[in-house]
Amino acid sequence: MKPNFFIVGGTKSATTNISYYLNEHPQVFVSKLNEPYYYCRFDVPKNFKRSSMITNEKNYLKLFKSAKNHKAIGEASSVYLHCPSAAREIKKDNPDSKIIIVVRNPIDKCYSSYFSFKFMNLDKRSFDEKIDYYEKKIEENEFDIYNFIEQGFFSKHIKKYLDVFEPDKIKIIFFEDYVKNVNSYINSLLEFLEIFDTIELKPQPKNSYRIPKNKFAEVLLNSSIFRKISTRIIPTVERQKIGEALFVKQTKIPEMSKIHRQRLKNIYEKEYHDLSNLLGTGLPWNDFQ
């Protein structure tokens, strides 16, 4: 069995939330492994490591072996949107597939990405240092899958999909609108997947900013072995529930400074207009209005 729809991004834009709700429908099957990264394998270095990543076709297709009479079969890997080769390779393997894209104010998306990295303890650099680092990567035309600055240039990434997929195969929604009316947007996505029976949604835990509950939890969460094993054997939503019960606690992300917000606004000012022109509509991003 092969997938026929993909939630390709953007990062930190409710893609896990959307996949959870779609999977609640009896005619929809979504891979229990979130972010398999399969179509990123052409763009990352050979020594790239991620616990959820699958590079072997046989193992990738195993993700969908439990799909039986489902009308829509899919997976969610938010990094597919900005991976240079993903659109082309998805089209080559799954020519009739449908693509779901969620776009979010890149200023907020960058900040959320930074704190996600901070929780994962991937590096200790400040927000300014990370912006400097990723801007330099862009200037040097060097692809970095975790480059949260590059990820926010939605128009150029969406164009890659429009170049290989028919417009009616692509559904684009705004994160800011989605979170205000989840039920309506899930139904619209089901309709996009040609499923016309609505369902009553069960609340899903929000993927808010989390920190370790204690030192033991911090050590365990920083263990690559622990992360790899838990990712492989425990589905994403169940893993989140276990984590929130035993290892992490929710807290609020510190408010972004006006200086940082202005810096990112300067970076994305042109992108705001480019994306608005591409989509032929205004964007619900107050920073640029």
Image (cartoon, rainbow, N blue to C red):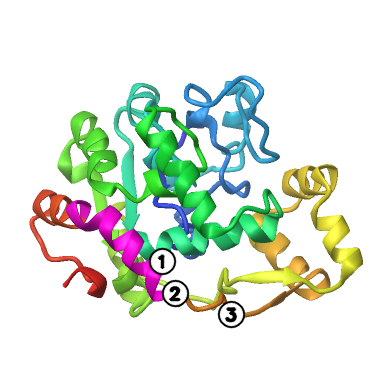
Which kind of residue does numbered mark 2 sit on? Ser
Q: How far apart are marks 2 and 3 (CA)?
A: 15 Å
Mark number displayed over residue 79: none
- Mark 1: few/some/many CA within 10 Å (<14, 14-19, 20+): some
| In front of the other: 160 or 124 | 124
Q: Is mark 3 on a helix, strand or loop?
A: loop
N-terminal of the pair, mark 3 or mark 1, is 3
Q: Do the residues labelled 3 and 1 touch (CB within 8 Å)?
A: no
Residue 249 visible somewhere in the drawing:
yes
Residue 9 drawn above or below residue 93: below
Residue 187 drawn above or below residue 162: below
Badge 2 is on which residue? 257
Which kind of residue does numbered mark 3 sit on? Lys
Badge 3 is on which residue? 252
Q: Position of residue 269 (x, y in %)?
A: 21, 57
Magenta region includes residue 111: no
The residue drawn where x is 50% and y is 64% is 112
Residue 54 drawn above or below residue 232: above
Q: Where is residue 94 in the image (x, y as percent from the top left)?
A: 37, 28
Badge 1 is on which residue? 260
Residue 147 visible somewhere in the drawing:
no
Q: Are marks 1 and 2 in contact (CB under 8 Å)?
A: yes
Question: Of helix, strand and loop, which mostly describes the magenta segment?
Answer: helix
Q: How far apart are marks 1 and 2 (CA)?
A: 5 Å
Q: How far apart are marks 3 and 1 (CA)?
A: 18 Å
- The quadrant holding residue 156 is top left
Which kind of residue does numbered mark 1 sit on? His
N-terminal of the pair, mark 2 or mark 3, is 3
Q: Is mark 2 on a helix, strand or loop?
A: loop
| In front of the other: 278 or 110 | 110
